[in-house]
Amino acid sequence: MNEQRPVIILIFIFLVSVVLLVKLFSIQVLDDSFTKKAERNAIQRIVDHPYRGLIYDRNGKLLVYNNPIFDLMVVPKELKIQDTAKFCQLFKIPKDQLKESLAAAKKYSWVKPSTLIKQISTTEFARIQDFLIDYPGLFIMTRAVRSYPNSTASHALGYIGEISGTQLERDTTKYYSQGDYVGLSGMEKFYENELRGKKGAKYKMVNVRGVDKGPFKDGEYDTASVAGKNITSTLDMELQMYGEMLMAGKKGSVVAIEPKTGEILAMISAPFYDPNELTGAEFSRNYLRLNRDIEKPLFNRPIMATYPPGSIFKIVQSLIGLQEGILTPNTTFACNRSLVACHNHPNPVNLFGAIRNSCNPYYHQAFRMIINQDISTNTFKDTEIGLNAWREKVLKFGLGSPLGVDMTNEKGGSIPSSRLYDRVYGEGRWKYSTIYSLSIGQGELLVTPLQMANMVCIFANKGYYYTPHLVKAIDGDETLVPGKFQIKHEVGIDEKHFDLIQDAMAEAIYGTAARAVIKDIVIAGKTGTAQNPHGEDHSVFFAFAPKDDPKIAIAVYVENAGWGGRAAASTASLMIEKYLRGNITRPELEEYVKAGKFIY
């Protein structure tokens, strides 16, 4: 009997083990009730997306606000669709799109939420919300898209869109996730960190059918989102809208700046587009259409287009000559049209007369004196030395490189150096006769419209500028504006030299831009007609006003509109009056500009 006891114990242990193994197998494999109970207690993390900061104009008028939309989210592991055709009908989604979206969601994660249907309107959300209970794994996430109450300043404000895979890879902060929206251009992109806010998260209990069973642990681990900071821009909405009305149907740009601060009052790129087109569910379709448009409405001309400055560059030449002592107010040259073409005006002219009458031969001869100073006995070498020295002085006017405006993709234009001509003609094989077109703002000189407007600020301020910018305050605090916009840039020209320049520019209005004259407002300005080998010349004008206490500096560039005294000068004059007076006293000039028949 005693000998059989160990055997009985072993048999007993074996039988108990078998029973336990069978029970465990039944629980874990055959019986899913415990799994269902666990699923009933599933914790779902919902990202709380913050509202993006609002953007106002300088007078507190709303430029950009948020409009709520809804994304239908899916957790692939939990979703069960019995009737695909019915699902597609209920949620108004094509079958192919459903398969594609689900495949992408599964590739991303089986257990993390992904977007199934993007940017559902409020009306559509109201229609589908009762269906969600029948589809475990689906839930709604509230987001916001941008809306523009006045459909203005599209290039300056920019737009937002869904973050790309490349951008996600570059996100070292790990702030963004797939499906997030991010600023893609303009102020929206430059001030992304200020506008985006801070995400929050909510944890809730859901059952197997996706029904919300309340917050996890009474919301102990929830964090609230923090809305983005509001931005007060420097733009004047009324001036911006008025300028866009004048430039409708034309190509070109208008940039207006408050010279004492560098604050951009208006930035117009024509043709423009309605910024509301690049929001919501139609973003991709509208972007593709705008991007394919041969008129290039997405191209931001004020900071990306480069043109020869034309006659307006003669002011820079005058200042450099005065500062170097090469020119004086009494320096006089004959209007020798064998050197370069010109128009009828009194002959000969001193410096004041050259500016007033925009005399091309005068600047041909003055520029030669600036470049060829007999520093070297070798003519070719002397021109090379003079050109490089001249270029260094021109660069101080904010030309030849990006100014640093608070937008991305700003171009810098071109101020040629000896290296360019060495590359084109060969070292020691070019001289003044090769480069004389620079004297009147032609040739290889290229500037952006923003740089032109900044030059006007320099003339208005008598020798300095602040980097042009679009932000006036962040969350109502002007001290949060980037410090680089508070730095005063001196251009190396003595203040005394600007008196003659300003007086001559004020007189020039009556000579070459009579349309720009405004009763009781003294404007100092300069016309330009930039040569265009591909068609009609471009119309250029810049000015500041009032002359003795400048409050606005403006540069207007109208492509293929001919003489600068017509299209550009008329547009600038109307905008100056609109800004300074608030109303227009010359309706006939306004109609002339709106009609756009400048070369007939």
Image (spheres, helix red, strand yellow):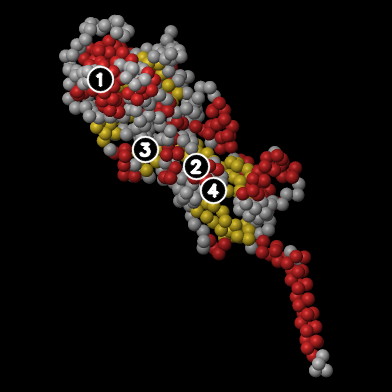
Q: Nearer the viewer, residue 425 or 505?
A: 425
Q: Is residue 54 above or below residue 510?
A: below
- Tags 3 and 1 touching, CB below 8 Å: no
Give the amino acid type for the residue marked by disc 4 in the picture: Ser
**Between disc 4 and disc 3, whose residue precedes?**
4
Residue under the image location 50 percent in, 53 percent down: 200
Q: Quadrant of residue 319?
A: top left
The residue to which callout 1 is attached is 382
Residue 156 screen position, x and y as percent:
42, 32
Left or right of residue 383, residue 535 in this image: right
Give the amino acid type for the residue marked by disc 1 in the picture: Asp
Secondary structure at numbered mark 2: strand
**Between disc 2 and disc 4, whose residue precedes?**
4
Rendered image: mark on residue 471? 3
Residue 64 screen position, x and y as percent:
45, 37
Residue under the image location 19 percent in, 27 percent down: 494
**Between disc 2 and disc 1, whose residue precedes?**
2
The residue to which callout 2 is attached is 182
Residue 368 screen position, x and y as percent:
25, 15
- Mark 2–mark 1 distance (CA, rounded to whole Å): 53 Å
Q: Which quadrant of the figure contains the C terminus?
A: top left
Residue 114 screen position, x and y as percent:
61, 48
